[in-house]
Image (cartoon, rainbow, N blue to C red):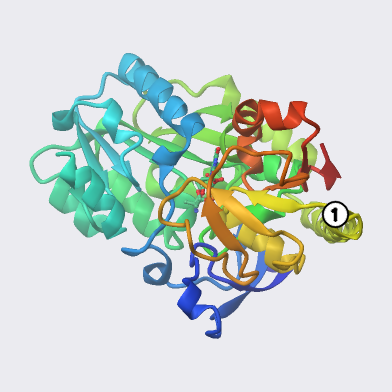
Amino acid sequence: MKKFLDLGLQPLANSYLLKKNLNRKEKKFRLSVGFDEKKYLVSIINTVPKEKMFNEKYPYKSSESYTMKKEFKNLSKKIKKKFKPNLVLEIGSNDGAFLKNFKKKNIIGVEPCKNLANITKRKGYTTYCEYWDGKLAKLITKDQKIDLIYSANTLSHIENYSEIFKAVDLALTHKGVLVLEDPSLLECLKNVAYDQFYCEHVYVFSTISLKKILDPFNLEIFDIENTHTHGGSNRYFIKKKNNDFYKISKNVGKNIYEEKKFGLHKFKTYKNFSKKVIKSKIELNKLFTNLSKKNKNIIGYGATAKSCTVLNYCKIKKGTIKYFYDTTSFKIGKYLPGSKIEIKEYKKLNKKDTDVVYLGAWNFKDEIFKKEKQFIKNGGKFITHIPIPKII
Ligand code: JHZ
C-alpha cells in the first residue's frame, strides 16, 4: 500500500469525552491513508481494533436524521417491490431506522453495539448483538437462507472484508442479493472531503476497488445507484456470479468509466488530492482567524465523526468554535475528542447570539438550511470546508 495522505495524530472519532475526563490524556493514533495499486483500494493504514470503536457506548444513531429515515423508507419500498424478499437481514442495523420499515417476521438485525441492539430488541425485532462473520451467518441461516442482505455505512468499517463476503455468500439464497451502501470515493475526492477518513472508515470504496475485492468470493456487482446521502454514496446491488437471474446493468460500466476518467486507478490522483487537502486546511484556518479577529460568535452544527478529523487535523480549538449543537442525546453534555469543544443540546439558531455556524454535518446541508431558514433570513452565515473552505 502506498501512503498518500497524513492527517496527523487523531483520537478515536466517536469517543466523546465526559467533563470529568477532560484532563485525562487521550489515546491517539496516526491517521494516514494509502492506495493499494493492485486492488485500487483506498484504506487507512493504522487500523484500530473493532471492539474499541463498536461497543455498548456507540453514540451514532441513524434515526436522529430526517434525511436518513426518509431515505430508508423509500429504499425499503423499492426493495420490496423489486426483489420481493421473504427474509431480509441488515448488517449494522444501528437503532432500527431501516428495520422498522419491515414486518418483524421478515427482517433480522445484526448490530454489535449493545446500546443500539437493545433498542431494536426492545421493539421486538430479532437482533443479534454480534459482529457479522461466517459463524454467525451459519447460525442465523441454519433453517432458512436470506433473500436480501442490506448494509449501509457498515462494510467500509470492517477491516477483514474476506470474512464478510464469505459469510454473505454463505447466507444468501441462490437468487439472493446484497445491497451495500457506502460513501463514494469519487465524490470524496471531488469534494475534497478528507473528513471521510477517520478510524471507523477503514475503506472508502469505489466501484473499481469493490469489483476487484468481490471477485474471489463468487460475488459481482450487477447495478449501482449514486445517492446523495453522506456526501455522495454508492448503492451497490451484488449477486452471486452463477445467478443469471439479474443482468448486469449499464450503470456498472458507466460508474467504472467515470472513476477511471477521474483517475481513481492511478496513484498520482491521490497525490494531487493530498495537495488539495493541505490547501483546504490553510484556507479554513484563514477563514476562522479572520472571523475571530472580527469577534464573530462561531458555533458548530452537528458534532460528527467527520468533524473530529477536521478539528484535529486543522488544529481548531474551543476558543475558535464556542460549542457544537447536536440532537443526539448520547453526545449532549460531552466534549468532542481532541479539540474538547463542548456539545450542547440543539436549539434553533438565533442571530442574536450566533454569527457564523461551522457545518460539521455538511452532508445534511439541505436539511439544516431548511430548518434554519429564519437564521439565514436574519443574516446568519455558515462556514464549510466542502468542496473548498468558504462562508455561505
Ligand atoms: P453524520 C457516523 O458518522 C459514523 P458522522 C459512522 N461511522 C458513519 O459512517 C456515518 O455516521 C454514517 C447531528 N445532526 O450522519 C446528528 C444535528 O444535530 O453526518 C449527528 O450527530 N442536527 C457510522 O458522525 C450528526 O449531526 C441535524 O439537523 O460523520 C450527523 O452525523 C442533523 C441533520 C444532524 O455522521
Residue extending farthest to the top is 81
Q: SS class of the residue under badge 1? A: helix
- Left or right placement of residue 34 versus residue 157 in this view: right
Query: Would residue 250 be visible to someone looking at this image?
Result: yes
- Left or right placement of residue 290 versus residue 223 in this view: right
Q: Mark 1 points at which residue?
A: 276
Please tell me whether residue 221 is drawn above or below residue 56 in the rendered image. above
**Residue depicted at 81% across the width and 32% down the height:** 379
Residue 158, x across and y down, in percent: 44, 58
Please tell me whether residue 139 is drawn above or below residue 246 in the rendered image. below
Residue type pointed to by label 1: Lys
**Residue depicted at 34% across the width and 34% down the height:** 98
Q: Quadrant of residue 34?
A: bottom right
Residue 155, x across and y down, in percent: 44, 50
**Residue depicted at 67% across the width and 69% down the height:** 32
Residue 58, x across and y down, in percent: 39, 59
How busy is the neighbourhood of tag 1: few (under 14 within 10 Å), some, or many (20 plus)?
A: some
